[in-house]
Amino acid sequence: MAAPTTAKWGGLLWIDAAGIGACVLASLIGYVTLVNPFVQKRSAAVGLQREMETRQQKATELESAVVAAKERLTTARQQLAASAVRLESATHINKRIAGVTEFFSGCELHVDDVQTGRVSSGLQYDLVPITILGRGGHQQCVQLLHGLCSKYPDMSVMRIEFSGNPAQPADSGKFRLELFWYAAPSGSAPKAV
């Protein structure tokens, strides 16, 4: 009687093994079709969430930078408006030359010759080249250059030549200054720059 029981259990073990195999196979199919896509989608969602948070943080930083840049621009425009230079018309060239020559005399420099070049017209200003030849000492030329920009903010020094002999008196040097005068554009009223 022992033999039929063993055969019975052997047949049942095979059925149990087949059932376990079917359960494992059903579990694998369920994992591959249901669980794995869900896990991948969840992982992708977490990655996108992190990327979105990073981009939001960067957007916030950029917005702060834009606000700071706008504040600096506003400040710069206010400073520019407060220190605006009124440009005179190039038709007042004789008045300008007389004023500059007087300024040179105030610095104890002797002006021998003043030459003006052709006026170059532009949208924002006209450019008038002025060349001044004269005599004077090195210290007086330095004094002139220190005060020229504050006295005439609408002029710039383009070239300086200074020559002299150390054996001769200090005020016997010769100079040549090439200046640009920024005048109001032709055909319009003076504008602030």
Image (cartoon, rainbow, N blue to C red):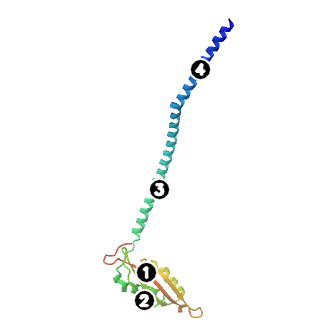
Q: Where is residue 171 drawn, in percent x and y?
A: 53, 91
What numbered label is drawn on residue 114? 2
Disc 2 vs disc 4: which is toward the camera?
A: 4
Which amino acid type is marked by label 2? Val
Which amino acid type is marked by label 3? Ala
> Which residue carries the number 1 mark?
180
**CA gap, disc 2 to disc 4?**
114 Å
> Which residue carries the number 3 mark?
65
Which amino acid type is marked by label 1? Phe
Position of the C terminus by quadrant = bottom left
SS for dot 2: strand
Q: Earlier in the sequence, mark 3 or mark 2?
A: 3
Q: Earlier in the sequence, mark 2 or mark 4?
A: 4
Residue at (58, 25) in percent of width and height = 24
SS for dot 4: helix
**CA gap, disc 1 to disc 4?**
102 Å
Q: Earlier in the sequence, mark 2 or mark 1?
A: 2
Residue at (65, 8) in percent of width and height = 4
Question: Badge 1: few (under 14), some or many (20 or more) residues near its Cα, within 10 Å?
Answer: many
Extreme residue toward the right, this view: 2
Mark 3 and mark 2 residues within 8 Å of each other at the beta carbon: no
Disc 3 vs disc 4: which is toward the camera?
A: 4
Q: Earlier in the sequence, mark 3 or mark 1?
A: 3
> Which residue carries the number 4 mark?
18
